[in-house]
Image (cartoon, rainbow, N blue to C red):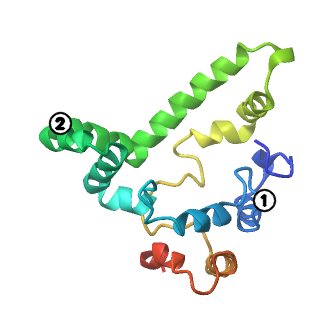
Amino acid sequence: MLNAQGKDASKETFEGFYDDFVEGRAMCGDYLDSLTSWYARRFDDNVLFLTYQELAEENKTTVLRIADFLDVDGEYGRKLRRSRRLLEKICAETRNEGVWECVESDTKRRMQEAAAISDEGKPEWVKRLQKAGNSEAYGKLFAKKAKGYQQGVIGDSMLTPEMAKRMQERIKAVAGAGCDVMNLWKSDD
């Protein structure tokens, strides 16, 4: 797996990943810049802004919010409210274990599809996916007992107090002094 500078991120430590993430150099780009730009639009009619913490702590309520948001006529939400079994099934899929099972099966499927593409017609993203799939980190990603695997526990942190402080400083620098985006993590202080 490559970071934004094209370095092999599979050989990095968590601290190295953290440094890239905080400085906006992660493979996914500058998460904090993206977060603050969408946070500013969180009340727009066409934006549903929610957090992992909301989904984990208020699973049913959040799933219903998503259903209501996706269907302006409200049919999705009504259907889930009428069928407790269907709501429970969707809630199970959105909890930590259900999400990881979906990610793992989807990633394996994509790896198989990538292998079927000829080398001369292979898009860059496919090459990167294959390289990531051959890395040591890929195997560790799905080894649920691997060191460093996040269990999805709210308030659990891999960050040292110094890392948390640095993250807060970076968020304030990106968001601006008047932005209340830090309230998203107020229960994690």
Which residue bears the numbered disc 2?
85
> What secondary structure is found at the residue carrying circle 1?
loop
* Residue 91, quarter of picture: top left
Left or right: where does residue 179 sit relative to residue 94?
A: right
Mark 2 packing: few (<14 Cα in 10 Å), some, or many (20+)? Answer: few
* Residue 158, quarter of picture: bottom right
Amino acid type assigned to the residue bearing label 2 in the image: Arg
Note whether 104 is above or below 173 in the view shown.
above
Which residue bears the numbered disc 1?
25
Amino acid type assigned to the residue bearing label 1 in the image: Arg
Note whether 78 is above or below 57 in the view shown.
above
Locate the N terminus by quadrant: top right
The residue nearer to you, when weighing 177 against 20, is 177
Q: Which of disc 2 and disc 1 is earlier in sequence? A: 1
Note whether 183 is above or below 77 in the view shown.
below
Question: Can you see residue 157?
Answer: yes
Residue 57 x, y percent position in the rendering: 32, 61
